[in-house]
Image (cartoon, rainbow, N blue to C red):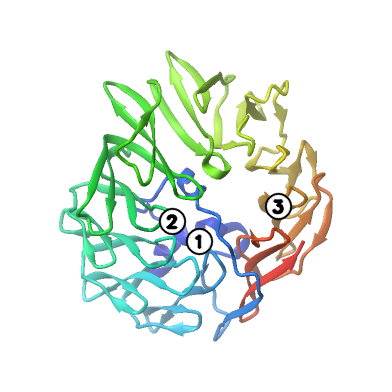
Amino acid sequence: MNRHLTTLAAACAAWLSLSGCRCGKPEPVRGAPPLAAAAAVAAVAVADKPAVLATLPDEREREFVFAERGGGVAWADERGGRFQVVHDGRAGKTYDAVGPIALSPDGRRCAHGAQADGQWRMVVDGVEGQGFDEVQSPVFSPDGAHLAYQARAGERWHLVVDTTVGPGTRSRLLGPEFGADSSRIALIDDADDQGFGRLVVSDLDFKGQTVVEARASELLVNGDRTQVAAIGASGGKQRVLTFAFDRPGQVRRGPDFDAVSRLAFGPGGRSLAYLAERAGQRMVVLDGKEETVPPGELFGPLVVRPDGKAVGIFRLDGDAVRLHQAFAGAGPDEVTPGGGEELTYSPGGLHAYASSRRGRQLVVVGGKDGPPFDRVVSPSFSPDGRFLVYRARQDGRRFVVVADPSGKTTRQLPTYEQVFPVRFTADGKSVAYGVKDGKSLRWVVEPL
């Protein structure tokens, strides 16, 4: 496999099934955030005007990264056994290998690792940084003004923010996560094999650091990046820690359990849910309330309903998969014959998820099956709850489906070779997303 394809596997994962990504098995990424953290990315205003972002020179297979707000696109190309990153059609310098690409939320800035002469450097807007043995996990701040990444020099791992190198630890780092105002950063450093390490909040030059907890895991920020949650461990017990990003010294500690997992903020960050165990009893905890979970394997993340009054998760009950909705008081759990994934709720509490029937895939809305396709992913309700949108593939073509709250299709948007994650515009009246259409990489905006 080409080296740049291997290192780009992490960027590809979010849209593997629909975007046309053909990466092989991804290698483990040191310090990658947990899945729950990926789901907590803040909602931002996206570009609401269609645009051609770049034109490809040929039709070779590539992996594309679109900016969160739709303002740019980047990819890696091979040239004579060497590799270069192309940002909005502008090709950078060639290297022996390149790493995962990060774009600032507005798409104007680009960063990636690059190897030359046996060293790795982070390349930011075409400028090479300090040389290290490894560089990984570039992430821009919400305002796009700062870049953080992890770097290994010898046996020590360092967090680097812009050009400032942190003190470093002998074990790996988890995170980092920027706060809403881009002036602070949270991370877990010196993490062990179980993912527990020191939870730290720091300014960007590492002169003002607060050690929140000596042993913590599962760093999670809420959607607007103002609140932080993590799992603390001491004395053989675990508990949930929560604090405001700008007040890391004021930590709220939940009750002790034998184990805690799957932290999940609700929309707006007003509610927090997690799984816990005590004396052999498994439960869902929502804002301090506890409810026992029936027997059976749980899979997928916890999803907090927008009103903060219920939490959904899928449960294997014998041979049947069921949607368990804790605190809902809704009677027996809904059976999902083809399994379930990507659970979501409307503002009014209606649930939807992707499932399958007889080799075909579909979206289930409120317990009712939608139309079947070859593949469906990423169902999401509009901010007003009037529409459900999801990506679908049929006969090799990709497109976005717009449905009403009953799951009935109201519009099937134009087809493309590849369709990337869908976002709602600020007014909630349109959807916007990146597409590959022949040699053209475009940002598409379609009214609902």
Of the 4 image quadrants, the one containing the N terminus is bottom left
Image x and y of residue 97, in percent:
34, 72
Where is mark 3, residue-wise?
382
Where is mark 1, residue-wise?
12
Q: Residues within 10 Å of mark 3 (few under 14, many from 20)?
A: many
Residues tagged 3 and 2 counted as in contact (Cβ below 8 A): no
Determine whether, in the image, residue 251 is placed left or right of residue 17.
left
Which residue is at 23% across, 48% downward?
209
- When the figure is inspected, residue 436 is found, relative to residue 439, above or below; the finding is above
- Between the residue at mark 1 and the residue at mark 3, the CA separation in whole angstroms equals 25 Å
Determine whether, in the image, residue 369 is placed left or right of residue 146.
right
Secondary structure found at label 2: loop
**Can I make out residue 380 in this image?**
yes
The numbered mark at residue 26 is: 2
Q: Earlier in the sequence, mark 1 or mark 3?
A: 1
Determine which quarter of the picture holds residue 6.
bottom left
Q: Amino acid at mark 2?
A: Pro
Which residue is at 75% across, 42% downward?
364
Q: Earlier in the sequence, mark 1 or mark 2?
A: 1
The numbered mark at residue 404 is: none
